[in-house]
Amino acid sequence: MTVTLGYATAVKGCADLDGQLAELAAAGVDPRRIFTDRTAGSADKMRAGLLALLSYARSGDVVVVVALDRLGRSVAEVTKTVADLTRRGITLRCLRNGLDTATSTGRIVADVLTDLAGLDAVSTTEVRP
């Protein structure tokens, strides 16, 4: 059974989270299946909502976010998250830019992001003189 899940995150005290929740609900995501994080702005804090979403999602599920940048605080983190979802057979839909990995174009974009995540993994394990 396919389950549609949502994820929203915003800096603590910012009203942006409410806007994201409204956009996700308007896109058909059940509010009870939306995972959220309110961060204090520190890049080193763990995002429990994102970790819970990634733990809960199964192959065949759909993860909906308002924008791709919600999936991480850096390009490396976003590409790794997209690569993880793709590898696990989880569809990703981004509302603002139209990315949908259920489409052929979306799969190509996800493949490129997955390749970039792989490059980042290689560059961090290289031994530098």
Image (cartoon, helix red, strand yellow):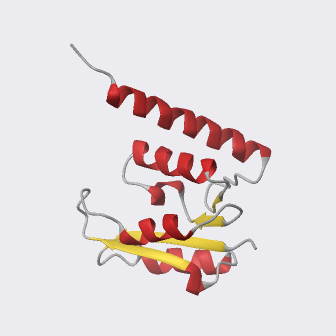
Q: Nearer the viewer, residue 121 or 28?
A: 121
Quarter of the image with the C terminus is top left
Quarter of the image with the N terminus is bottom right
Q: Is residue 126 above or below residue 57?
A: above
Q: Is residue 122 above or below residue 106?
A: above
Which of the 4 quarters of the picture holds residue 122? top left
Which of the 4 quarters of the picture holds residue 114? top right
Residue at screen point 49% across, 33% down: 118
Left/right of residue 62 with respect to residue 7 in the rendered view: right
Q: As drawn, which residue projects farthest toward the top?
A: 129
Q: How many marks?
A: 0
Across and down, in percent, residue 128 comes to 25, 17
Q: Nearer the viewer, residue 38 or 3?
A: 3
Residue at screen point 42% across, 43% down: 75
Across and down, in percent, residue 107 comes to 71, 44
Q: As drawn, which residue projects farthest toward the bottom?
A: 32
Across and down, in percent, residue 23 comes to 59, 75
Across and down, in percent, residue 85 comes to 58, 54
Residue at screen point 54% across, 78% down: 34
